[in-house]
Image (cartoon, rainbow, N blue to C red):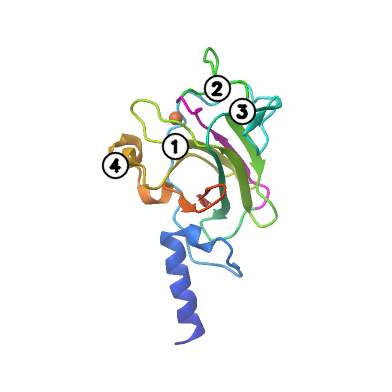
Amino acid sequence: MSGTRVDRGRRRLALGAPALLLGATVSGPVSALTTTPKQSEGPFYPRNIPSDSDADLTVFNNKRAPGEVIEMVGRLFTTKGQLLPGGRIEIWHCDVNGVYAHVGRNTPPGFQGFGAVRTDSSGAYRFRTTLPGIYPGRTRHIHVKVRGANGAALTTQMYFPGEPGNERDGLLRRARNPAALIARNEPGPPPRYVFDIVLG
Ligand SMILES: [Fe+2]
């Protein structure tokens, strides 16, 4: 088999599951990746970005958020398969009781609920947070808003593998490619959810 054919095989693999590229070396142009599907923003994007909005959402005002600690990691790609350093990744999600940190709503003192980072020189990002709870009508999810340094933007939601509610969630089921929105789980501790994002 020629080197070219091996490369083609790798590219096909990347198309369906960009997460599999994590840790691999991406060199030179890769064939087109499919854009991560859009999802609705919902009503709980913060009205004001909180003063503590760093990559560690498990601690807020020196207090620890209740709930199971998890990591959410991934890399940001263009549709050409190029890694995007310097992209802004924002996440927000509800607390263990299914409540968002938002105007008029009460969440535990240590619950940050929103975080923002920039992708590093390899296009990677990492958050440490707590497993979101579930609220009526939805399966477990984390809201994600992305803006690449090239100006491309995306609002979407990340889902958790193996959740019974995934089958019944209308938003997830109506997505163009639901599988692309379900993170890949890696054993911990803490458990890690890999969510690679392709910006169109
Ligand atoms: Fe939500």
Determine whether, in the image, residue 170 is placed left or right of residue 112. left
Q: Mark 2 points at which residue?
A: 101
Say which amino acid is labelled 4: Glu
Say which element carries label 3: loop
Q: In which quarter of the image is the N terminus?
A: bottom left
Circle 4 crowding by C-alpha within 10 Å: few under 14, some 14–19, many from 20? few
Say which amino acid is labelled 3: Gln
Which quadrant of the figure has residue 140? top left
Give, as a single range, the part of the protein colored magenta. Answer: 85-97
> Is tag 2's residue or tag 1's residue first in the polypeptide sequence?
2
Q: Give residue 100's position: percent from left, percent from top.
A: 51, 23
> Is tag 3's residue or tag 4's residue first in the polypeptide sequence?
3
Say which element carries label 4: helix
> Is tag 2's residue or tag 3's residue first in the polypeptide sequence?
2
Q: What residue appears at the point 61 percent right and 28 percent down from the top-left corner?
A: 112
Circle 1 crowding by C-alpha within 10 Å: few under 14, some 14–19, many from 20? many
**Ligand 1 neighbours mark 1 (CB distance < 8 Å):** yes
In space, the residues marked 2 and 4 are separated at their CA atoms by 27 Å
In space, the residues marked 3 and 4 are separated at their CA atoms by 29 Å
Q: In which quarter of the image is ligand 1?
A: top left
Q: Name the residue under label 1.
A: 141
> Is tag 1's residue or tag 4's residue first in the polypeptide sequence?
1
> Is tag 2's residue or tag 4's residue first in the polypeptide sequence?
2
Q: Mark 4 points at which residue?
A: 167
Q: Is residue 95 above or below residue 10?
A: above
Q: Give residue 167's position: percent from left, percent from top.
A: 29, 41
Assess whether mark 4 and mark 1 are in contact (beta carbons under 8 angstroms): no
Assess whether mark 4 and mark 2 are in contact (beta carbons under 8 angstroms): no
